[in-house]
């Protein structure tokens, strides 16, 4: 399953979760939004991503040690006297003029140095090991992200199923409530047996108990979903229309 979500919208949505936690209305949460928030805010996904970035950084440093090293130096500056002249008189009384840039200087006014390591087996092996470690870290990060996404999909589906089951049982409870009222009226008129009225009442009570259990399970699943996507403390509402 592919989930596409704009990062800017994701940030705004996830930040809105904490503001919505104090609101009376639950925060609508689509499946794509749930997966994206979990990947952006979840501890496991973030840890795997940090480990991948560190491995890539080490691999980059190892590669850089094998690349040509360019160095640029310059004697220029705001107080440079490279263009000034030194005038002196030798022992024969002849005036001599020397440029300051040539007195005791081994380097030019602007210098470019290029150093290249020709062969170092240990550094080459270290660079290859770092490259392989970066690939392994990238694969692990991808696997971790897929596992997080799969867990969110399962938790989202369970929350949705519990809500749908509770809705259907609510409709059954309403019909049983109406049937119980009819049976009670008929029993008072002597047109039905008391045993039948009690059977309807027992079934209605059983459905009510199951409704309470389902409501508790749905709330617990929704809280777990909110915590998994980084919206701990917020009340979320799953959206059936967001399913692919």
Image (spheres, rainbow, N blue to C red):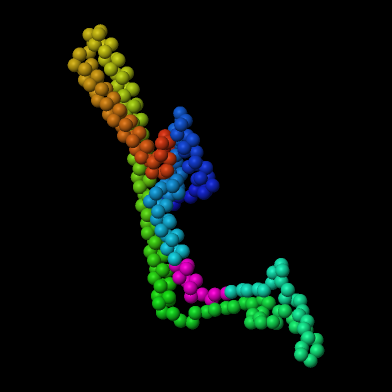
Q: Residue at x 43, y 76 (%)?
A: 124
Residue for point 29% across, 25% down: 208
What x and y, as percent, mark residue 139?
A: 39, 61
User: Please, is residue 213 above or below residue 79 in the view?
Assistant: above
Residue lying farthest to the top in this orientation? 189
Residue farthest toward the bottom in the current orientation of the protein? 92
x, y percentage for residue 55? 42, 63
For this rendering, which residue is in front, 23 or 146? 23
Which image quarter holds the C terminus?
top left
- Can residue 142 be seen by looking at this rendering? no
Residue 185: image quadrant is top left
Q: Is residue 150 visible?
A: yes
Q: Position of residue 76 (x, y in %)?
A: 69, 72
Seen from the viewer's position, the closer of residues 44 and 79 is: 79
Magenta stretch: residue 60 in it?
yes
Residue, x 71% and y 79% (percent of image)?
A: 101
Task: Specify the farthest residue to the right.
Answer: 94
Above or below: residue 67 compared with residue 173: below
Q: Which is more toward the observer, 176 or 59? A: 59
Q: Nearer the viewer, residue 105 or 23?
A: 105
- Vertical side of 206 occupied by 97: above or below: below
**Residue 1: % across, % down:** 41, 51
| Count of labels in the image | 0
Q: Residue at x 71, y 71 (%)?
A: 80
Q: Which residues are magenta?
A: 59-70
């Amino acid at each position: 399953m592919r989930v596409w979500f704009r990062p800017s919208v994701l940030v705004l949505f996830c930040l809105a979760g904490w503001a919505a936690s104090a609101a009376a209305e639950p925060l609508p949460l689509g499946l794509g939004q749930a997966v994206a928030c979990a990947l952006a805010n979840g501890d496991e996904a973030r840890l795997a991503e940090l480990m991948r970035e560190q491995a890539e950084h080490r691999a980059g440093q190892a590669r850089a040690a094998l690349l040509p090293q360019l160095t640029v130096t310059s004697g220029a500056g705001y107080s440079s006297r490279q263009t000034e002249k030194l005038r002196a008189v030798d022992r024969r009384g002849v005036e001599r003029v020397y440029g300051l840039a040539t007195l005791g200087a081994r380097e030019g006014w602007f210098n470019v140095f290029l150093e290249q390591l020709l062969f170092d087996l240990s550094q080459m092996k270290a660079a290859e090991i770092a490259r392989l470690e970066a690939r392994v870290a990238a694969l692990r990060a991808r696997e971790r992200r897929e596992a997080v996404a799969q867990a969110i999909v399962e938790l989202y589906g369970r929350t949705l199923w519990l809500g749908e089951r509770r809705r259907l049982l609510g409709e059954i409870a309403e019909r049983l409530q109406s049937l119980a009222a009819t049976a009670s009226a008929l029993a008072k008129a002597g047109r039905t047996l008391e045993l039948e009225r009690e059977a309807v009442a027992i079934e209605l009570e059983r459905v009510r108990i199951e409704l309470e259990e389902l409501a508790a399970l749905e709330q617990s699943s929704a809280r777990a979903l909110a915590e998994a996507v980084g919206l701990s403390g917020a009340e979320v509402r799953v959206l059936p229309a967001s399913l692919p």
